[in-house]
Image (cartoon, coloured by chain):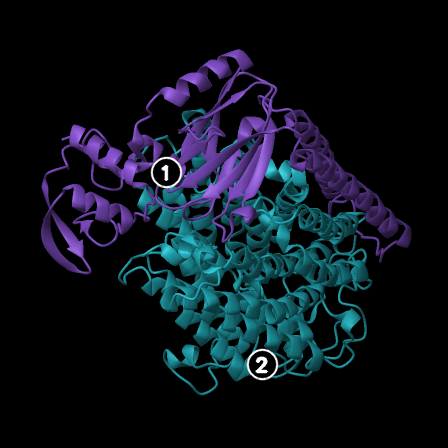
Chain colours: A purple, B cyan
Amino acid sequence: MIQASSYAGVVDDAFIFILGTSIVLLIGVTLTMLFFAFRYSRARNPVAAQIEGNMVLETIWTVIPTGLVLMMFWYGWTGFRIMRDVPEGAMEIEAIGRMWSWAFRYPDGHTSDELVVPLHQPVRLTLTSEDVIHSFYVPAFRIKEDVMPVARPENRNHLWFQAEKTGEFNVLCAEYCGERHSKMLSKVRVLPQEEYDNWLAAAAVTQVDILKLKGCTACHSLDGSRIVGPSFRGIFGSTETVVSGGTEHQVVVDAEYVRKSLAEPLADVVKGYPPAMPPQQLTDDEIAAVIARLQELR
Amino acid sequence: MLAVDTPGSVRPSPSFLQDAGGRSGIGAWIFSTDHKRIGLMYAAAMFTFFIVGMCLGLTMRLELMFPGEQFISAAAYNRIFTLHGVIMVFLFIVPGIPAVLGNFMLPLQLGAEDVSFPRLNLASWWIYMIGAAMALASLVVAGGVPDTGWTFYAPYSVRTDSSVSLAVMAAFVLGFSSILTGLNFITTIHRMRAKGMTFFRMPLFCWGLYATAWIQVIATPVVGITLVLLMLERTLGIGFFDPGKGGDPILYQHLFWIYSHPVVYVMILPAMGIISEILPAFARRTIFGYKAIAMSSMAIAAVGYLVWGHHMFTAGMSDTARWVFSLLTFLVAIPTGIKVFNWLATLYKGSIELSVPMLYAFAFIFLFSIGGLTGMVNGALSTDIHVHDTAYVVGHFHYTMFGGAGIGFFAGLHYWFPKITGRMYNDRRAKIALGLIFVGFNLLYFSMLIMGILGMPRRYADYLPEFQPFHMASTIGALILVPGLLLMLWNLLHSARTGAPAGPNPWRATTLEWQTASPPPLLNFEVAPEVTTGPYDFTHDPLLQENPA
């Protein structure tokens, strides 16, 4: 399996030690059991010996496993300390998890739906959840930490890594978070420093689709297909039947409806769709951008 | 430890199946306070739920054969894995061995007429059935089946509109059944042992039940309180776990696992007790290290309270809390290892017959060893971070709880089948079933271990195409396992009516339950037994006297 972070090798060494020891023990236990079943079968050994116990053996198989598990603990702990010890001067990026997409906010304020980082550069990710618990997992880096909703920003979880291989690696959500948990995927793209600088300069001026950036497209398709909520294709200006507190009525999907649905998504839910959307905190500019995009998709 | 006359020499009483204590019809069962009938009623209910849970598991495996959506939506998949977990955990494996085999065998093994509080025992069964009915009602009420996973993690469980409240209420009610059964067993073990049966002359199954009962009594109230807090949060909007109101989702996880980790020992300790019964009976020798095995059950129960934090290694606990919990977790491995080594030593210089219960015991030792050893990866911090919440954990959990507790349960069912029914199961069918179960099981769950290490998260309705070969292998395993399980259950049901009469002690085993008729009479023993030796005293092995070597 690819080792794409600075500490992936340390983690894998612990895997090899623990799994290796375990396999030796498993084979030992199994072969002993099968050998005894063969050697002391009723046919070969009709009269059993009545042996009640042996203090020396009990001591041996208490002390040796104790030593082994303490070594496993030590391997796990020393590797873990490296994973928690954020180097000085690590680059700060905020990872935002929400049902059901990821966003990454860079120090210069711009946001991306995939994580792009420079090679050989320590990166500290602050983990922010906008709704339920998610978990940021990059198997190639051997890192995972839950993205918890917290009362105060200083209580947010964090993790760090230093990418050692260029390429694209999967970002997965590892804590069950609802219907599209298994679709809450992104990529971490590792670029050489120079390419990264170019990307950053371009990203700062490129307009990313606001619907993608805010995670809308995790549930609302742009092509008319059904995901969780109604598709954005052709919805603006249409007349929809909505359910409001159990009663149905008709609304025209206009700027007013969009604004209300972002703030209170469950107030008027389009009929036939689950009341699943969390309230969105968008600035007035962002709301205007969303409305503009919806108009384009008529 | 034989102390009663041979069964033929006393006037035979009717068996508990014929003698309903004056009741008739269905009332002879559902109002019976006979521990044996209550055990069988639990068995009927639990294996019905087991088959439902098994079908749900198979549905998931079929859906996951290929990436993308095959025949169930992601929303349905999430409800199915929740229901599979709730049924298998709360309705099957937690009550599991204690409710069925514990109820049936504990008074018999102790030489008692019944448990200490027979009516409380019947009440426990009723509470269990009410809880089960509530869990099933969540299928049909508004909102539908919960989609939270069996762990009901806040804040997702607070915001979902599925019928979490009812399912949580069901788990709360089921908890009382567990507490009362535990209380009953503790009292029974302290107060009802036969004359001469000291604590260290008790069969090891009783020791397993004793350690289990303390966990049930002490730990279950914690989950009860937790679930009440969750219901208050859902209905009244109190923010125990809602960070928006100053609460903390981590608090829910701590409270939940303070119960739910010890409860895995509720599942496994009685199974270990069963293995400790079967090995001496079919190796014709005393158990090796009786006290070490008995005390390791108590040690596992005690240390098991202090390790719950390993379920939260990625949840953002302090780094100190993480290493402390890691260290404590590894300590549980030591008494577990002691048990396995003593079992192996019990085979040494035995006279081993590979009967069906013995083969199940061997399967248990192999599968449970994999379960325990794969847990080492979860106990160590750096490796757990990688496999936490992946299919690896699902595989590890099933190796311990199904390969361990489940296979131990099946071992016990076969071992005590002649005692319970008075008949013998069909040996050939039982062996074919075990073969299918063993092969299917390993294919199903070993595939999960591998894909988890490769980075396949758990609770995924869909997955990246690179994991497909492992999912396919896993599903094929399920397709082998399920017929094996059905054949095993059918064989037991069928043999209960058609099997050859077994006689009081077909295994020539030494513990007290074998010193009475099969099936036992209503009050268990014709003459109150008296005990003069340890439980596995084969110095005058009756088998050798019948067939001298």
Q: With respect to residue A164, does B181 lie above or below?
A: below
Dot 2 falls on a residue whose secondary structure is loop
Give the image location of residue B417, x and y in percent. 55, 62
Q: With respect to residue B103, does A7 lie above or below?
A: above
Give the image location of residue B384, x and y in percent. 62, 40
Query: Which class describes the residues within 10 Å of circle 1: few (<14), some (14-19), or many (20+)?
Result: many
Residue that carries the numbered disc 1 in the rendered image: B62
Residue depicted at x 63% and y 52%: B309
Relative horizontal placement of residue A183, taking residue B392 as reference (left or right): left
Give the image location of residue B285, x and y in percent. 78, 57
Give the image location of residue B64, x and y in percent. 39, 36
Quadrant of the snapshot with the N terminus of chain A: top right
Q: Is residue A251 visible?
A: yes
Which label belongs to residue B192? none
Residue that carries the numbered disc 2 in the rendered image: B12
Query: Which residue is farthest right?
Result: A56
Query: Which class describes the residues within 10 Å of circle 2: few (<14), some (14-19), or many (20+)?
Result: few
Q: Amino acid at mark 2?
A: Pro
Q: Chain of mark 2?
A: B
Q: Amino acid at mark 1?
A: Leu
Q: Nearer the viewer, mark 1 or mark 2?
A: 1
Q: Chain of mark 1?
A: B
- Res. A247 image quadrant: bottom left
- Distance from Cα at disc 1 to Cα at disc 2: 53 Å
Query: Which residue is farthest bottom?
Result: B22
Dot 1 falls on a residue whose secondary structure is helix
Residue depicted at x 49% and y 33%: B456
- Please name whichever residue, B60 or B454, is drawn nearer the observer in this view of the structure: B454
Are the residues under badges 1 and 2 in a single subunit?
Answer: yes
Q: Earlier in the sequence, mark 1 or mark 2?
A: 2
